[in-house]
Amino acid sequence: MRKELRFAFIRTIPVMLGYIFMGMAFGLLFQNAGYNFIWSFFTAVLVYAGSGQFLLVDMLQKHTGAAAALILMLSVQCRHMFYGLTFIEDFKKMGKAYPYMIHSLTDETYSLLWGTVIPEGLDLKRTRLMIAVLDHSYWIAGCTLGALLGSLITFNVTGVDYAMTALFIVIFTEQWLGNKNHTPALIGAAAGVLFIVLLGGDKFLLPALAVSVGGLLINQKLDERKEKTENG
């Protein structure tokens, strides 16, 4: 397991740098809202929703009702339903870790699980579990540390969230260079740009994901038909 842990740690270093600072920002906001580090710790463990946790701070301050909070959180986190479809069969094969892998599937963890080529000699299931556990631990550490430091933090954290954008750019570039077929990437990029233009940056995600999934399914069918034609 040491080999899997070492490999997973190296792969998750970019996530660690982003999660620690973003988690600290959340912890600071949560502490300022009147919730100490214990609340921040358990929120990071049980909710583990990134942008959803920042939304949670606002909802708690405004005393948002349970039904409205559920709808708001679902609208922000609904993209994870699409991510889950990709790995549902793989996660089922992981036995007792299956529920945790579902819980820990954030944007960044999904990107690493999808884009990481596991070297020969490493156990695939263990390595994926280590990646998920390390990413989660970084987020927990950042959220708890931010709440503990509280008002002692004097530096400006504005712009720290760009670390996540930079991470996705790096992962996208690696996948683009490592795959000859760029059609899936182009479908996703085109859908995203189209709906940002049509709906704006705050409403584009769900329809863009739906169109991307539809486009990928059509592309898969066309590839299968082409393969059958070539094979006679």
Image: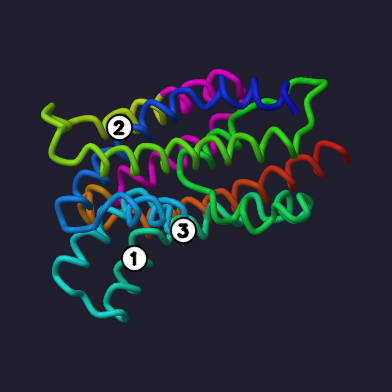
Separation of residues labelled 1 and 2 (CA atoms): 22 Å
The three-letter amino acid code for the residue at tag 3 is Leu
| Residue 20 locus on image (x, y percent) | 36, 32
Q: In the image shown, does 204 or 42 lie closer to the viewer?
A: 42
Separation of residues labelled 1 and 3 (CA atoms): 14 Å
Q: Is residue 171 left or right of residue 5?
A: left
Give the residues in magenta.
Answer: 170-195
Q: Secondary structure at mark 1?
A: helix
User: Which residue is drawn at the image coordinates 46% and 38% (left, top)?
Assistant: 108
User: Which residue is drawn at the image coordinates 32% and 40% (left, top)?
Assistant: 23
Q: Secondary structure at mark 2?
A: helix
| Residue 158 locus on image (x, y percent) | 15, 32
Q: In the image shown, does 55 or 207 lie closer to the viewer?
A: 55
Q: Are marks 1 and 3 in contact (CB under 8 Å)?
A: no
**Looking at the picture, does residue 9 appear above or below residue 158?**
above
> Where does the C terminus fall, quadrant-wise?
top right
The three-letter amino acid code for the residue at tag 2 is Phe
| Residue 122 locus on image (x, y percent) | 78, 25
Q: Name the image quarter holding residue 156.
A: top left
Q: Secondary structure at mark 3?
A: helix
The three-letter amino acid code for the residue at tag 1 is Met
Numbered tag placed on residue 73 in the rendering = 1
**Eye-nearest disc, 1 or 2:** 2
What secondary structure is the stretch in magenta mostly built from? helix
For mark 3, what is the residue? 46
**Eye-nearest disc, 1 or 3:** 3
For mark 2, what is the residue? 21
Q: Are marks 3 and 2 in contact (CB under 8 Å)?
A: no
